[in-house]
Amino acid sequence: MQTRELGKNGPTTGALGLGAMGMSGAYGETDRAESIATVHAALDAGMTLIDTGDFYAMGHNELLLAEALRGRDRDSYQLSVKFGMLGQPGHGIGGIDGRPASVKTFLAYSLTRLGTDHVDIYRPARLDPQVPIEETIGAIQEMVEAGYVRHIGLSEVNAETIRRAHAVHPISDLQVEYSLISRAIEPEVLPTLRELGIGLTAYGVLGRGLISGHWSADGSKPGDLRGFSPRFAAENVEHNLTLVEALREVAEAKGCTVAQLAIAWVAAQGADIVPLVGARTRNRLTEALPATEIDLTADDLAAIERAVPRNAARGDRYPSAHMQALGVGN
């Protein structure tokens, strides 16, 4: 697999990263053995960056990764860990905590669950409105100096917050949803990242499966968070799937799948972008892997833009209560 530099201050990673959230039940039932096999297949294919969060099923995801990574050379992969989302029984979210003492506590638990002595990229999952970002980043900086963290990242924050954080300690990358149907970062956030030499790890590159080419209007199952997403709601999903069918025509002309084309589009937006693929099975991983090898011409990009114009999707990417915690919109 090709590699990419994650900004001026981040690590060199595989051109695709693996997002592990879906392996812990976010999108319905999962198969533990298949999840572990998928992690192994990703590493064997040259993917090195694995993204998780300590709040993914309240630590389940970190424990799963610890099992999957056991026996692997620690220098052969990078762990990106998000923290700060407070949990509740029943897997609800109870707020955001970016206080310095909490940062260090969250990290201590993550290191134990992951069975490692360091995290490669550590990042607050959301901005704590009660804590200046300088204090949160300052606490992570202390962990960098102590050797427990290699790089500091951010997630879902605006350009002003990026500048303030970067002034405390160099930021390796911003993690944010970025896809053909989620392009809010383009006017201000993306130029700011490039001005400062900060990379981008893009999650949701397939819109949580909506633009994968595999989704159907009645695709939600019990326990699937997409059942609460406005973009998957009955009043929006049919329209959104018409965009997918238009994209399918472009993909067929290019000789690839819809998912491959959607991932390739994100990768083509800059060499400083690493798309995160949330594959839960080896089959989906196998489909995604060739995406960064697809060469999109100017004509291809224009055809994709016609098929899925900016702001063409209907519905917010999160329920309204969650949208309030984001630094960028849809």
Image: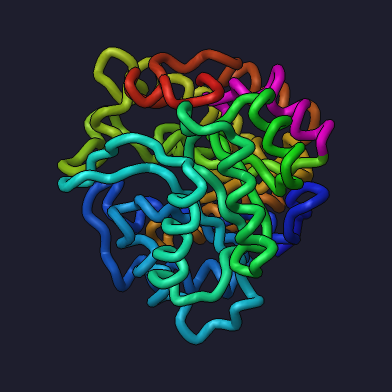
> Residue 122: image x %, image y %?
57, 54
- Residue lying furthest bottom: 71
Residue toward you, 272 or 268:
272
Residue toward you, 311 or 171:
171
- Residue lying furthest front: 101
Q: Is residue 185 magenta?
A: yes
Residue span colored magenta: 179-196
> Residue 227: image x %, image y %?
24, 31
Q: Residue at x 27, y 52 (%)?
A: 25
Q: Tell me if residue 138 can be seen.
A: yes
Q: Residue at x 51, y 75 (%)?
A: 116
Q: Is residue 267 left or right of residue 202?
A: right
Q: Tell me if residue 284 can be seen.
A: no
Relative to 308, does residue 71 appear above or below in the rendering?
A: below
Q: Is residue 240 left or right of residue 72?
A: left
> Residue 234: image x %, image y %?
25, 18
Residue toward you, 92 or 282:
92
Relative to 2, does residue 202 appear above or below in the rendering?
A: above
